Image (spheres, rainbow, N blue to C red):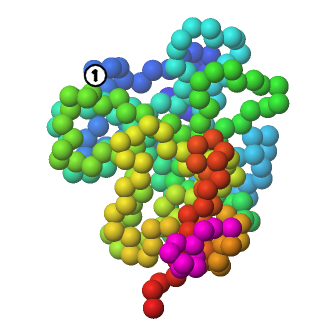
Amino acid sequence: MGIDKFYRKAVFKQMGMGSQGSGIAVTTAYPFGLDLHVKPVSLLIAGDTGLSCGLRMRYEIGLDQTNQISIIAVEGRLRVKKDLADGVHAGIEGYFEASETGTVLSGTSTTQNCGGHFAVELSAAVSVTAGWLTGITVDSSVNSAVSLASCEFAGVRVKKTGSAKDWEYGVHVENSEIGIHIGACTTAINFGTPTGSVFKFIDDGTIVSVTNGSILNDIHGTANAGFIKVIVGASTVRYIAIYAAKT
């Protein structure tokens, strides 16, 4: 069936491919259920949507939904019913790849080149009255009886492959009222074996200083060589004195 005829036939109807328990057969020779290749043939200009993509899904809520239900524009689900060996196994994978001699990734300081991009946009007319509003939510639905003693179990993992370049920042946070919030947990922060330092601060003279804090009481007559300002409780200001290495 030609794509034009397919479109005219399916545009006003739901479309199904395969069925649960008896899906589209894949083999080593044909490993994809749907293989879609897209390539620009001209210089693209931002149109009404401001973007171009290989596959676009837009789910519009045009009627109030008052029942409890999860509504997701695109769902990727890997259903495992038999053993899995080595490899990457995931519900969704985003992969950014660049190659070819002379290829340049340019733009401005706000340009984003990433394996996955998520954003939340609300107009001024919208109100949020309950629940959470997040850029990414990572949920564990692993049954508590499952033994994880032989693996590492993490909500978010930052890594590299082989001899690839180290990340400059494992996690980069900016424009946030609270950069990192740690709620109820057994251990708030667990450090491995850093080769440089545990913490690195900018000396702004107010929150962190590397000069004597005359506002502090020196310990046993030893003058402090700076301080770190902290908030204890809701708003109580306290200081951690820091000292130069002993000579």
Identity of the residue drawn at 30% across and 31% down: 142
Q: Which residues are magenta?
A: 215-224
Q: Is residue 37 above or below residue 219?
A: above
Locate the C terminus by quadrant: bottom left
Identity of the residue drawn at 59% across and 36% down: 134
Reading the image, the residue beneath label 1 is: 22
Magenta stretch contains residue 218: yes
Magenta highlight: main SS:
loop
Q: Is residue 69 above or below residue 125?
A: above
Residue 144's x, y, as percent?
25, 29
Q: Is residue 96 above or below residue 107?
A: above
Residue 127, picture quadrant: top right
Left or right, 82 with reference to 242: left
Q: Secondary structure at mark 1?
A: loop
Left or right, 148 with reference to 243: left
Q: Residue furthest bottom?
A: 247
Q: Is residue 82 above or below residue 246?
A: above
Q: Nearer the viewer, residue 185 or 43?
A: 185
Q: Residue furthest right?
A: 124
Identity of the residue drawn at 73% across and 54% down: 44
Q: Residue furthest top?
A: 67
Indicate the amino acid at tag 1: Ser
Residue 126's x, y, as percent?
77, 25
Q: Is residue 239 visible?
A: yes
